[in-house]
Structures are given as C-alpha cells and as structure tokens.
Image (tube, coloured by chain):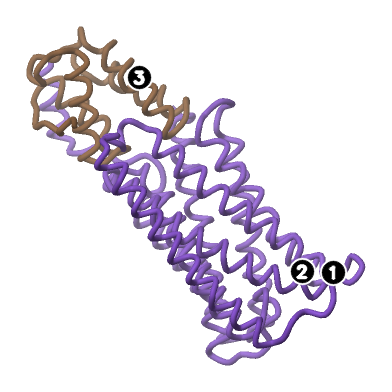
Chain colours: A purple, B brown
Amino acid sequence: MIASASMSAARSGPPRAPGLSFVAVVLLGALLVGGRALLDMTVGPAGAEPWQRAVEVLTAVVTIAVALSFSAGDPPRRPWAVLAVSMGILPAVRLLSYFEVKLADVVAAHALLILGNIAMVTAVIGFGRVLGSSELLSDRTAKDRVRATTFVILLAAGALAMLAFPTLELALRGVPATFGAWVAASATIVSTLCDALVFAGGMYLVWLVRPLLGGSLARPYLLIAIGGGAFLVVDMLLVTAGATTQTELIGADLRNLVTKWLGCLAFTSFALAAATQLALLRSAKGR
Amino acid sequence: MIKPIATAHFADHVVHVLTPLLGPHTAKRALAMICKRAGKEPAELGTADLAIACSTLRPMLRTLIGNDVTVRVLADLGTAGPT
C-alpha cells in the first residue's frame, strides 16, 4: 500500500498548491495596476482616483478578513490584525484628507498617517518574529544568528540613511512655525522612516521564507516585501514633490503618474498578500 | 543542523503532502526532522510513525499558518497516505 500511494502520487504529479496560484496573483495584479494606468491615460488622474480608493479599500477589507479568519491563539493572527489596522487607517486618511479635517491647526490625516505607518512597521516586525520562531525555518545555530543579526543591522542602517534624505529636504524648507506644521513635517519623516523599515523588514521576511520558495506559504510574505519596496519608492518621490500623501499630487505629468502607479502597485501587493493568505486559510476550511 | 534527505515510501508521501505548502526544500527538511525524532532512516518510516510525524509537525506548522491549515495538512498525511 505504501508503494501504491507513492505510485499514485507519482502518477498525479505534485499536488496543486493550496490558495491563489502564481498566475492568478500576476493577473489580478496586472488588472488592478493596469486599470489605474488605463484610467489615468484615458480619463485623466481625477477619473482614476476612485479606482485607487477602491484598491485601498479592497486592501483593507481583505486584510481584515485574513485577521478574522485565523483562530484565536494562532501566532500569525496578531501581525495580520495589526496590518489590518494599518490598512484600515489609510482609507480613513484619504477621507479626512478629502474633507480637509483639522484638529486645531493639525491636519487630522497627517496625525492618522503617522499611526498607520507605525502599525505597518509593527506588523512586519511581528511577521518576522512569527516566522523566525518556527524551527522549520531556522537552524538556530550561532552562525545563523550572527548572519541574521548582521543582515538586520545593515538593513536598519540603510533605513536610517534613507531618513537623511527627507530630513535634509525638510530642513531646506525651513523650520516649521506651528504645531500643525510640525505634525505635517513629522508625518513626512515618520512615513519615510516607516516605509524604509517596512522595506528592510520585507527583505528580512524574504530572507526568512527563502527555504519555503515553491510553496504557497511563502507567497504572502514575498508580496508584502514587494509592497514595502513600492511604498518606499513612492515616499521618496512624494518627498521630492514636496507632498505628504499621493492625493496632494496635482497634475498629470509623468512623475506624478509614476508615483501614483507605484502607489497602486504597493496597495495591490498588500491586497494580493492578504488574498493569497486568505485563500490558503479558506482552502483548509472548505475541505 | 538537520539536512534534507532524499527518500522513498511513506517518506515520499510526507514530502508529497507538504511540498505544495512548504516548498520542496522545507518539505524534505520537515521529513528529516520526523526521521530524527523517530530515530529511523526515511526508508524505515511507516504509518506506525504517523503519530510522531504529527507531533513533530503540529507546533511548527501552527506557528507558520495557524491551526486550521495545520489540521488539514496533518489529516492529509493520515487519510491520503499509505495504510
């Protein structure tokens, strides 16, 4: 019977990976980002903004669904819940930004943006801790620990170097005169720092899940890393444009469009990360 | 350090079930951990070692993917495998 099971397995080939296939992820990504680009080119950036908002809301909804799909006590549940908070805050940032809500002279969207970015960093650190705690992915030798620590230190140093850019740019604009201006400046710096940390954390996740390549478990974390990288590039472009959020970019010049497409790619990557994780969890419940 | 091992029989079944989720490298590594725990070579593993396989894999899989998927994967090890 053992032999027959092996033969049966050999006849049927490797079993299909649970969750969303690689092709489905690529097609959905192309649809979401391509849809934004198509609308920008045909009806203009103003007409494409609702598409972007829809992608952001979709990202929040799917991420929340993942957090709710884990059972109580599942280790990945907490970082997914924190990521859901972060992704849920961003549509709220857009809404507050649209209505120009202010508390005293503080733009409410800027204050919320700081919280959302901190939550995102916390989530990525949480993913790293969960993955790093599994014996399957860690040999736990002294050599491996030294290598991992060195890797994280180098990434953190890179992240700090990234902070120098927006700080210098802000310094050249002059010292903020009001509390609200300080919050706006802080939002820009915190956002860039957090995106640099998310990018560094995303690279660390890739390093952690590299033994899982070829398995569906690796896909959400690889997509989170792609999203983190895209967010970082968006932030750098926003800083050079003197803006804090994408909604502040006016005009249809190529730099603005590329910034918005990358922003769409970032949210799409996080949405697909959540969707692949959700499909994996649902595949277990559906059997 | 536990090295992945090329195997046959029940061991093949374990790798076959785990590969879609964990990828080929980690699936073989998981098998090596089961072998180490059972004190057997991969070719010596049989259904009698299913309980050891489950107790070895359960905490590690639960950490990575949660309880529901872990239960499904361990059920696949038992139901679709050799008898």
Confirm or deny contact between disc 2 and disc 1 (CB under 8 A). Answer: yes
For label 2, the residue is A183
Amino acid type, label 2 = Val
Chain under numbered label 3: B
The number of discs equals 3
Tell me what residue is drawn at x 15 percent, y 33 percent. Answer: B3
Q: Is residue A192 above or below residue A260?
A: above
Q: Position of residue A46 (x, y in %)?
A: 69, 82
SS at mark 2?
helix
Categorize mark 2 by other alpha carbons within 10 Å: few (<14), some (14-19), many (20+).
many
Check disc 3 and report the residue beneath it: B75
Q: CA distance from mark 2 to mark 1?
A: 7 Å
Looking at numbered disc 3 in the image, what kind of residue is underneath it?
A: Ala
Q: Are marks 3 and 2 in contact (CB under 8 Å)?
A: no
Residue at 39% x, 61% y: name it. Answer: A26
Q: Residue A153: where, in percent of width, then height?
A: 40, 56
Q: Which mark is residue A106?
A: 1
Mark 3 crowd level (few <14, some 14–19, many ≥20, 10 Å Cα): few
Q: Nearer the viewer, mark 3 or mark 1?
A: 1
Quadrant position of residue B35: top left
- Type of amino acid at the residue the image marks with label 1: Val
